[in-house]
Amino acid sequence: MAVNRERLCRMTSVADYDVTGDTLGNLFEKIKSLIADHGADAEVDIYLDENTGYLGVYALRDETDVQMATRIRQEELWDATWEARNNIRNGVK
């Protein structure tokens, strides 16, 4: 298997917003601001518990240098492990 050495886009948390007790008008303004900051294609998750509600906002972002290096190391390790297991299965020494 080949290791992907190209920079990837990842869905990344870009904002959390407590909506508990907020008015629809304030929420509308906050959503307009979030769209301006992160684009209309950003995704929203809603978290609710007994007393609070949160909006989690996620947008596609290029992976950082650290994330990219970590991913490549993990892919290289997985690739080497996969190759070793494949050789064992095929009786290659």
Image: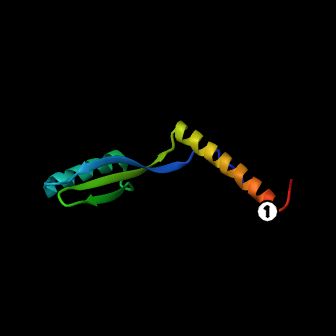
Image point 65% across, 44% down: which residue?
5
Residue 32: x and y in percent read 26, 51
Q: What colour scheme has been applied to the protein in the rendered image?
A: rainbow
Label 1 Cα neighbours within 10 Å, binned few <14 / some 14-19 / many ≥20: few
Q: Is residue 57 left or right of residue 60?
A: left
Image point 51% across, 43% down: which residue?
63
Specify the quadrant of the image occupied by residue 88: bottom right
- Residue linked to disc 1: 89
Specify the quadrant of the image occupied by residue 92: bottom right
Image point 20% across, 54% down: which residue?
19
Q: Is residue 38 left or right of residue 65?
A: left
Image point 33% across, 59% down: which residue?
45
Residue 35: x and y in percent read 31, 51
Q: Is residue 2 left or right of residue 23?
A: right
Between residue 25 and residue 45, name the one nearer to us: 45
Quadrant containing the N terminus in the rendered view:
bottom right
Q: Secondary structure at mark 1?
A: helix
Question: How many labels sit on residues?
Answer: 1
Between residue 43 and residue 73, name the one nearer to us: 73
Residue 47: x and y in percent read 28, 58
Amino acid residing under circle 1: Arg
Furthest-top residue in this view? 65
Q: Is residue 27 left or right of residue 35?
A: left
